[in-house]
Image: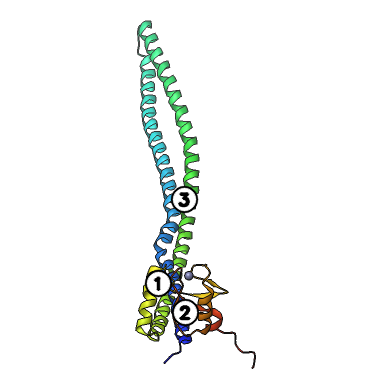
Amino acid sequence: MASLREKLKMLEELQQIDLETNAVRAELGAVPARKVEADARVVEARRAYDEAKQRLDGSERERRQIETLLGMERDKVKKWEGRLGEIRTPREYAALSREIDIAKKTNETQGEQLRALLAAATELRATLEARGDALAEEEERAEAAAAAIEAERAAAEARLAALEGRRAGAAAQVEPGLLAKYENIKRRRAGVAIAPVVGATCKGCHRNIPPQLSIVLQRADSIETCPNCHRIIYSEGAVNPPAPATA
Ligand SMILES: [Zn+2]
């Protein structure tokens, strides 16, 4: 039969295991969010790349349209210029010459537009290339981050399995009634069922306990609870006395 001191030590051990388990579970629970976060920058980089690609494609589409139109208009001007020689009346000649001048001016304006589009395309292509590089970099970074997260997840799973093994062993050593009390308090007290009293302060709620109870705790031969937070309490000094100085 374990002494009460030993029972309290086992409960304290169980508490440590449970707190570690909670921490590992929280770590595992955060994995999906960490993965999403690692991917978010890739998503953003891909969006920026796609946007640059669309702008370049749009600009090139516009350029090809103008090139086609300009080619047709220039052919028309050539045809008209050829017809000038066949014209017999000065009035018709003057009229066609005016048409040719107007068309040439329009073509000149279109030509300028074309040069502007070509210059813009150079810039758009440079932007696209830079964003492509940035995307590749983010993808590489995200891949490394995913691998790191996965390694940490696997390590956490291994720690959890080890903790579950330790917990089963520790729980088996606590008598069922006391274990049920521990579980019950743990459920109602934010996962902490047992707390040491240091000085006269309960470390569960950080309130002082009555002097009378302090004296009881020094004996470490009964299960006591904090009058304030209702956790199982014990005297740190009485349950874990400093090792005797004799070697
Ligand atoms: Zn307390």
Characterize the local packing of mark 2: few (<14), some (14-19) or many (20 or more) Cα atoms within 10 angstroms: many
Q: Provide residue 152's location: percent of width, then percent of height.
A: 46, 70
Q: Provide residue 236's location: percent of width, then percent of height.
A: 54, 79
User: How far, Cα to Cα, is label 3 from label 2?
Assistant: 56 Å
In the rendered structure, find residue 129 and report the number of the disc placed on it. Answer: none
The residue carrying mark 3 is 132
Give the amino acid type for the residue marked by disc 2 in the picture.
Glu
Q: Provide residue 198's location: percent of width, then percent of height.
A: 56, 74
Quick one: 35 or 94, which is closer to the camera? Answer: 35
The residue carrying mark 1 is 186
Quick one: 40 or 13, which is closer to the camera? Answer: 13
The quarter in which the N terminus is drawn is bottom left
Q: Provide residue 212's location: percent of width, then percent of height.
A: 52, 76
User: How far, Cα to Cα, is label 2 from label 1?
Assistant: 12 Å
Lower position in the chain sequence, tag 2 or tag 1: 2
Characterize the local packing of mark 3: few (<14), some (14-19) or many (20 or more) Cα atoms within 10 angstroms: some
Residue shown at 48% from the left, 60% from the top: 141
Tag nearer the camera, 3 or 2: 2
Residue shown at 45% from the left, 31% from the top: 114
